[in-house]
Image: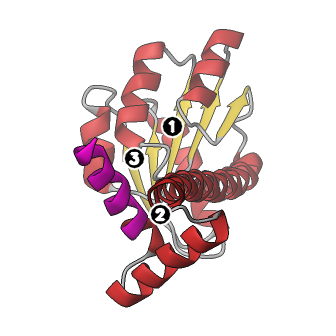
Amino acid sequence: MTNRLSIVIVEQDRERALLIVDALRASGDHEISVISERTGLSRLISEKNPDVVLVDVTSPSRDMLEELTLASSPLDRPVAMFVDRSDDNLTRAAIEAGVSAYVVDGLAPGRIKPVLDAAITRFHMFHAMRAELAATKRALEERKIIDRAKGLLMKARGLDEDAAYALLRKAAMDQGKKMVDVAEALVTAAGLLS
């Protein structure tokens, strides 16, 4: 954690909250806020819009995990959760909720920085994988649309696949559009005419 981070700590116990704050301050100059209320957690976290959320709870409940998911939107920021005890179902629920680091019986001042570093790294890794997956899905959908448009041109004009592709490409260049946009317009028009 070399950059200045905005960190929200969710902790009801004042002494434990101060322990976490001290450990974070020792690791760098961060903007730190503590939320001690569990009621309205999603609203409070959303208002602060932190870079990272650190949650310290004795035993997380499903309601808290749901509230945390709504609040922190783990797709938007890393979440590290320290718990004193857990079970397999809650661990699975935390991970499915997008918690980047889930540490059982591990809140020691010396472990806070490495766990946050790991949570941030893991979050960025999964964020990159999600972006790559979305791009791949988008490319596949575009390929399907282009293939449908080529099939329509092949059937309507008696062209082979290469000629149909060349015709689509030329139309896209002539119109200053992306090939997938021209293909989609053709597929839509053919659907209306059927």
Q: How many marks?
A: 3
In depth, the one of 48 and 153 nearer the eye is 153
Residue at (73%, 40%) from the top-left corner? 108
Residue tagged 2: 157
Q: Secondary structure at mark 3?
A: strand
Amino acid marked by disc 1: Glu
Q: Position of residue 52 (x, y in %)?
A: 51, 54
Amino acid marked by disc 3: Val
Majority secondary structure of the magenta segment? helix
**From this viewpoint, is residue 122 visible?**
yes
Q: Which segment is the magenta one?
A: 182-194
Residue at (56%, 55%) from the top-left corner? 147
Q: Is residue 183 magenta?
A: yes
Residue tagged 3: 34
Amino acid marked by disc 2: Arg
Residue tagged 1: 15
Q: Secondary structure at mark 1?
A: helix
Whole-angstrom CA distance, mark 2 to mark 3, is 68 Å
Quadrant of the frame with the N terminus? bottom right
**From this viewpoint, is residue 87 visible?**
no
